Image (cartoon, rainbow, N blue to C red):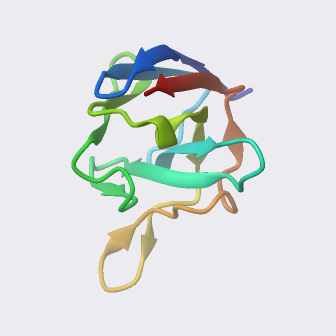
């Protein structure tokens, strides 16, 4: 049984930083994509960062240069370091796992859409005040 548990959310002022963690258990795939998504009230769930089993990363333009995704395979933990936070970053943040990835098209890549991500955590709230 795959389980993903996020932690590290909270309230910060604009310009501040947070580090989210996602502890994975029961996940034994040797090839995979892991992703961070977020969803603000009234908006669709947005893929913001991904990483594959080789450590290759991808970012949405909205967070590129401010957020960093990483993983510690020994601890089975995924991280999202968020710097220079803005009020528009306020959302529920989810980690997700896609055991079918990464995909190949002129290079390997992970999806940034919720479709294809089979396993999801319960989410952690991030609130950024101005």
When the figure is inspected, residue 49 is found, relative to residue 58, above or below; the finding is: above
Instruction: Work out whether residue 25 can be spotted.
Output: no
Across and down, in percent, residue 34 comes to 48, 44
On the rendered structure, is 48 left or right of 16? right
The residue most toward the front is 130
Comparing 12 with 55, the one in front is 12
Identify the residue shown where x is 28% and y is 28%: 15
Question: Dividing the image into 4 quarters, which one contains the C terminus?
Answer: top left
Comparing 103 with 62, the one in front is 62
When the figure is inspected, residue 43 is found, relative to residue 102, above or below; the finding is: above
Instruction: Work out whether residue 39 can be spotted.
Output: yes
When the figure is inspected, residue 112 is found, relative to residue 20, above or below; the finding is: below
Quarter of the rendering containing residue 105: bottom left
When the figure is inspected, residue 12 is found, relative to residue 93, above or below; the finding is: above
Across and down, in percent, residue 126 comes to 54, 25
Quarter of the rendering containing residue 86: top left
Identify the residue shown where x is 42% and y is 50%: 50
Question: Dividing the image into 4 quarters, which one contains the N terminus?
Answer: top right
Identify the residue shown where x is 72% and y is 26%: 122
């Amino acid at each position: 049984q795959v389980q993903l548990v996020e932690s590290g959310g909270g309230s910060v002022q604009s310009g501040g930083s947070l580090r989210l963690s996602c502890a994975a258990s029961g996940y034994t795939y040797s090839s995979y994509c892991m992703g961070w998504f977020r969803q603000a009230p009234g908006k669709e769930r947005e893929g913001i960062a991904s990483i594959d089993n080789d450590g290759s990363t991808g970012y949405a333009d909205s967070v590129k240069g401010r957020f960093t995704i990483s993983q510690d395979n020994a601890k089975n933990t995924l991280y999202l370091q968020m710097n220079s936070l803005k009020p528009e970053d306020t959302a529920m943040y989810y980690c997700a796992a896609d055991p079918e990835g990464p995909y190949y098209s002129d290079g390997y890549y992970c999806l940034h859409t919720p479709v294809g991500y089979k396993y999801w955590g319960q989410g952690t709230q991030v609130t950024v005040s101005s």
